[in-house]
Amino acid sequence: MKEVIGLVIFFFFFNSSFSQTGETLQSVTDRGSTTDNIIIANEFTSNGQYAGFNFKDRNISGRLWTWYSRDASARLFNSAVISDLLTIQENGNVGIGTSSPAYKLDVNGNGRIGSVHLNNIVSGQGAYVSWNDDGGGGMTYFKNQRGQGGGGFSFQESTTDNVRTDLMRISSNGNVGLGTISPAYKLDVNGDASIATNAYIHYAPADLRMKVGADGLQCFNFSGSILKSLLLNPAGGNVGIGVADPDQKLTIKGGGIGFDHNSADKKLYSPADGVLEWMTHNSAGERAFAVSHQGQKVVYLSTFGNSYLNGGNVGIGTSNPQSKLAVNGTITTLKIKVTQEGWADYVFDSSYQLAPLSHVEKFIQENKHLPEVPSAAEVKKEGLDLGDNQAILLKKIEELTLYIINQNKKIESLDKQIAELKENQRKY
């Protein structure tokens, strides 16, 4: 307030001095200089504080501009504003809108450099820098959000109707948001992202670095020198490929699982239950599909050699096979070969005792089947052992052959006796 009163007294003194003395700088114009405005040069000697000169705009009545010095600084004053507009200190600091600039250029208020606007806090909004590159109605802003709560900075753009949209937000806690004004993470992206070369995610506590690039998705140790296992949902949950709602730990839709032909180790592995292995290029030259358990191949299906099943019973049409191969249905084949011990050749040994036919007849009358041959009820209940049955049938055929031979001998003996009787009768 004291400064303003002093400046008013200063202006009054200059104007009075000019009107009373008629000093006009005629000597200046006599040397060839001309001016359309009234100029007064003087020194205000009260306390030795002010020295300067005034110049007046003749088109606007009462407006006086004053360029004066004070407190080791040069200042520009306007009577319409009644304040210092420009201050230049002896240390080189320049102030616009402030009489005590603390920097080489200290602006208290809004500014503009070409298409770049400098704006201070206005109506509760943060200070910002704005610019327009193409000359259109839209603007781009770099804004301090402190005035609107939360702090931080934002990059914004506006349309011709001054509707602003956040492009990037940097919160006071260091979080960066793209497409969001409230980033919850160090980098929070709301929308799609594209990276031209490689992208890395580092997690130092687990010595882990994940890379996405031309080589696909890879997992390294933190220094990037050792490949590590890539874990998907290790704590639980399912993984889907080609499907949005996987119902298994790994669900694949629309394709299969491919293995490199030159890889010698193509396996689906479970340390407790076994290994499902597809062998196409291993050291043994195998071309097969195998299921192994505890190091032993229990299923082996070869594409050009022998195949085998080596574990438990196999059922076709039944879930409860009672033998190595159980078929609930009809088997169609060109040949069946059975290897059987205890074949019935012993029937033809001289020591074999052939049962009398009377005994066989009696057994048949009582049991309705041959001795040693299973009954219909037994076959229905227990089934039929093909090898044992063939051996029994062969035994019965061999016994029948012996019976026929013995009968033939008796017939031949009777025929001989009849012939002798007939010969004797003819003689007598």
Image: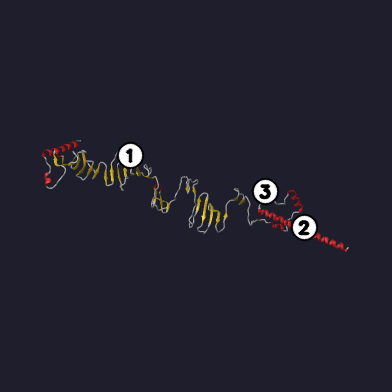
What label sits on residue 263 in the rendered view?
none
Name the residue rendered at 76%, 51% in the picture: 361
Identify the residue under disc 1: 148
Residue 388: image location, x then y, percent: 67, 53
Q: Earlier in the sequence, mark 2 or mark 3?
A: 3
Q: Circle 2 sits in a helix, a strand or a loop, which is it?
A: helix
- Nearer to the camera, 278 or 182: 182
Identify the residue under disc 2: 407
Residue 407 seen = yes
Please name the amino acid that badge 3 sits on: Lys
Please name the amino acid that badge 2 sits on: Gln
Give the number of the mark in front: 1 or 3: 1
**Image quarter hosting the N terminus:** top left
Q: Is residue 259 left or right of residue 190?
A: right
- Nearer to the camera, 317 or 73: 73
- Dot 3 alpha-carbon crowd within 10 angstroms: few under 14, some 14 to 19, many 20 or more: few
Identify the residue under disc 3: 380
Q: Circle 3 sits in a helix, a strand or a loop, which is it?
A: helix
Residue 376: image location, x then y, percent: 69, 49
Residue 250: image location, x then y, percent: 49, 48
